[in-house]
């Protein structure tokens, strides 16, 4: 098979890139290791910046998102029993949209056949070849047969554990990493959220987040030690913990219900600064990870592919090399700022096992400063809604 751009990975980065290229008549094929059902079963992001919703709008794929997504004009930081509302609408004129990654992915998947975007699911042993030549190619195994895709370019959108970053070469000089000594235990349930807006809470029992997917579906997380195992957490134990943390500060208190999903995600900050090798480009989690505090991961994947699509469109349309040459620097400038914000909010809102009384007083002083300073709140709000492209 021959195509213009072979895209590895059908997560948000790969699917968005595929649609952006197809909208300009550029041929592409997406190769995904998992099945469609598996991809849709991963419960991840919930908060979208206008950069991300804007891309869906530009593609004309935003009808369901506009109908079902929840516009949020503010969110809350809680410190023990004090709530600080960050009025993002008043401070920035913008809002964020609560719309699950699963739903966004489904919209992109469903629209693929009509837009001529071919997606090969359940492709195993995906390998990248000759990425420094003008004719890079991808091989994979499906239905017991080895297939080959010849392309002009390869886009590595295959997440943190994918094959593309390895094909760039895992030189430690390009890796910048911080692993946090805790994870997030999350639960999704069809119960009304405890509060109309998100609450990021730093309490004596550790960090907790009250989020949602709709007025009838809640998403909660709590900080758990790095070594915590999901088997040690019954649903009842988690609901008890959430009630302890949110009943005193939320509008309605925590409503319990059967879990639709429960899982633990480790927290990591990671940037791989080499996002290009020859005709291979990385985008999204393949090149960087943020801790979920701040809700930046999916949104960064979206801004990467907006830049990459623009550069590829300029190459195919006008033969321009410069936008492709500038992709890495342009993407990294936004990535590092989102890394900084996610790291800052993680440090501000979590209990670190190595921290003593002094560090805790520093955290409290910082939160107190946020509570009383419009400048601090504006800085937080403008990062939360997303820095401009
Ligand atoms: P993905 O979504 O990991 O997709 C990569 C795809 O590549 C496939 N793949 C391969 N395909 C072929 N060959 C291989 N060798 C392959 N290896 C992997 C995978 O199966 C997969 O389908 O990366 P992408 O597209 O870059 O998207 C990134 C986002 O998924 C991620 O950044 C966000 O989910 C992060 N995130 C959040 N981001 C936000 O913007 N807002 C949030 O509110 C938010 N909350 C979260 C989050 C991530 C979380 N977890 C579980 C990590 C909350 C959590 C709990
Ligand atoms: C979510 O709803 O899953 C969510 C919201 C905000 C975050 C992270 C995750 O910062």
Image: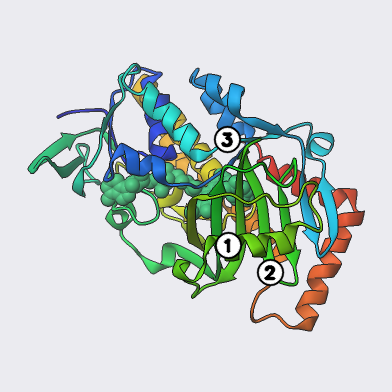
Picture quarter containing residue 309? Answer: top left
Picture quarter with the C terminus: top right
Of pointers 2 and 3, the one earlier in the residue sequence: 3
The reply to whether callout 2 and callout 3 are in contact (CB within 8 Å) is no
**Residue at point 82%, 62% (across, down):** 367
Work out whether mark 1 precedes mark 2 in sequence or the reverse, and give the earlier one: 2
Q: Which residue is at 30% across, 59% downward?
A: 169
Q: Does residue 4 appear anywhere in the picture? A: yes
Query: What residue is pinned by disc 3?
Result: 99
Q: Position of residue 108 (x, y in %)?
A: 42, 28
Can you name the residue that lies furthest to the left here? Answer: 145
Residue 129 visible in this rendered orientation of the protein:
no
Q: Helix or strand or loop: what does disc 3 sit on?
A: loop
The Cα atoms of the two marked residues, 1 and 3, are separated by: 27 Å
Q: Quadrant of residue 12?
A: top left
Distance in Å between CA atoms under marks 2 and 3: 26 Å
Q: Is the C-beta of the residue carrying label 1 under 8 Å from the nearest atom of ligand 1?
A: no
User: How many numbered discs, if any?
Assistant: 3
Residue, disc 1: 236
C-alpha distance separating marks 1 and 2: 18 Å
Quadrant containing the N terminus in the rendered view: top left
Q: Nearer the viewer, residue 281 or 348?
A: 348
Q: Are marks 1 and 2 in contact (CB under 8 Å)?
A: no
Mark 2, residue position: 206
191 vs 292, nearest the viewer? 191
Above or below, 97 against 34 in this view is above
Image coords of residue 24 (percent x, y): 39, 18
């Amino acid at each position: 098979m021959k195509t213009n751009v072979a895209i590895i990975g059908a997560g948000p980065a790969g699917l968005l890139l595929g649609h952006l290229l197809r909208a300009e008549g550029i041929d592409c094929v997406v190769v995904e290791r998992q099945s469609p059902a598996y991809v849709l079963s991963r419960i991840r992001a919930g908060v979208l910046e206008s950069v991300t919703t804007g891309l869906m709008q530009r593609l004309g794929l935003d009808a369901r998102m506009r109908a079902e997504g929840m516009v949020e004009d503010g969110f809350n930081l809680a410190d023990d029993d004090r709530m600080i509302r960050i009025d993002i609408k008043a401070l920035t004129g913008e809002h964020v949209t609560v719309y699950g990654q699963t739903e966004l992915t489904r919209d992109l998947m469903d629209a693929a056949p009509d837009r001529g975007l071919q997606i090969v699911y359940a492709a195993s042993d995906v390998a990248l070849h000759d990425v420094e030549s003008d004719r890079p190619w991808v091989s994979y195994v499906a239905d017991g047969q080895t297939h080959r895709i010849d392309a002009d370019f390869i886009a590595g959108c295959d997440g943190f554990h994918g094959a593309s970053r390895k094909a760039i070469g895992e030189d430690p000089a390009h890796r910048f990493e911080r692993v946090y000594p805790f994870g997030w235990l999350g639960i999704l349930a069809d119960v009304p959220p405890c509060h109309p807006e998100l609450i990021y809470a730093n309490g004596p029992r550790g960090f907790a987040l009250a989020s949602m997917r709709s007025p009838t579906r809640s998403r909660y997380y709590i900080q758990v030690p790095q070594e915590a195992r999901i088997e040690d957490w019954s649903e009842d134990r988690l609901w008890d913990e959430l009630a302890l943390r949110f009943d005193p500060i939320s509008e309605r208190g925590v409503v319990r219900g059967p879990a639709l999903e429960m899982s633990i995600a480790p927290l990591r900050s990671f940037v791989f600064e080499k996002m290009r090798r020859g005709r291979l480009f990385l985008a999204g989690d393949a090149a960087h990870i943020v801790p979920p505090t701040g809700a930046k991961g999916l949104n960064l994947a979206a801004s990467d592919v907006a830049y990459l699509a623009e550069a590829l469109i300029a190459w195919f349309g006008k033969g321009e090399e410069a936008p492709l040459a500038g992709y890495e620097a342009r993407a990294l400038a936004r990535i590092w700022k989102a890394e900084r914000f996610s790291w800052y909010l993680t440090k501000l809102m979590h209990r670190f096992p190595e921290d003593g009384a002094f560090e805790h007083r520093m955290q409290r002083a910082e939160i107190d400063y946020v509570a009383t300073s419009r400048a601090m709140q504006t800085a937080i709000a403008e990062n939360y809604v997303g820095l401009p492209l």
